Image: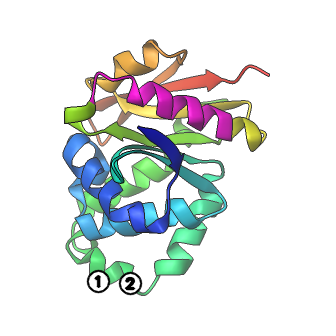
Amino acid sequence: MEVSLAQKKDSLQIAKIHAQELKDSFLSSFSPVFLRILYGSVITSKYSFCFVARENSQVIGFVTGITDIKNFYRYFLKRYFFLLPFVMISTIFNLSKIKRILENIFYPKKTKDLPGPELFSIAVKSEFQGRQIGKELLKRFVSEMKIRKVNVFKVLVGSKSDAVKFYQNTGFELKDKIVLHGKEESLIFTYKINK
């Protein structure tokens, strides 16, 4: 198993892993095409990055980070402005989904003193879980954040997600609890990078 920076051609495999392993996440309610475009943007934008774990040239896990969320969304929308309406046709006419998108984008305003940089997503294929791959991905993630002069970052996770234990066991600190989408409680963890 090796961990390296993702290439744009990995975006389809990453999107498939997200859809399969993060089924309860809000992003999984979007089409695989949208996820592929989103992860392609994460890989190519200077405001974000992605590491993948590979085995026999196959992507078996990934972690993504965004260092500047406003500029990342600006990059994403500018690059795919004309394509997104076709990819998100079912969303355009779904007011509740649009509301959820806006809540996810602007949730940091609901709490005080949150760092801007964020661990956006992390997942490992179920058949490869239990081999410390997530911890290795997180280790590379933290190293990259350090290189980018980030001292602390956040992650948002559903309170009922299996990932809560992962964050609790890897040095994250619970910062706040918020309610998104009317009823779902989410936890915001932060991670301070030692200099």
Is most of the magenta stretch helix, strand or loop? Answer: helix
Q: Amino acid under label 1?
A: Phe
Q: Is residue 151 above or below residue 181?
A: above
> Residue at the front extreme?
56
Q: Is residue 171 covered in magenta?
A: no
The quarter of the picture where residue 153 lies is top right
Check whether the beta carbons of the residues at disc 2 and disc 1 lie within 8 A of each other: yes
Q: Is residue 65 visible?
A: yes
Q: Is residue 170 above or below residue 86?
A: above
The crowding category of the residue bearing disc 2, from other C-alpha atoms within 10 Å (few below 14, some 14 to 19, many at least 20), is few
Residue 86: x and y in percent read 29, 83
- Residue at the image point whose x is 46% and y is 79% from the top: 80
The quarter of the picture where residue 156 lies is top left
Q: Is residue 3 above or below residue 50?
A: above
Q: How many marks?
A: 2
**Which quarter of the image is occupied by the N terminus?**
top left
- Of 188 and 146, which appears nearest the observer? 146
Q: What number is the disc on residue 83?
A: 2
SS class, disc 2: loop
15 sits left or right of 141 in the view: left
The crowding category of the residue bearing disc 1, from other C-alpha atoms within 10 Å (few below 14, some 14 to 19, many at least 20), is few
Residue that numbered label 1 is attached to: 86
- Residue at the image point whose x is 57% and y is 53% from the top: 49
Give the Cα separation between the discs numbered 2 and 1: 6 Å
Q: Amino acid under label 2?
A: Leu
* Segment tinted magenta in the rendering: 129-144
154 sits left or right of 143 in the view: left
**Which quarter of the image is occupied by the C terminus?**
top right
Residue 59: x and y in percent read 35, 50
Q: Is residue 52 above or below residue 178?
A: below
Q: Is residue 143 covered in magenta?
A: yes
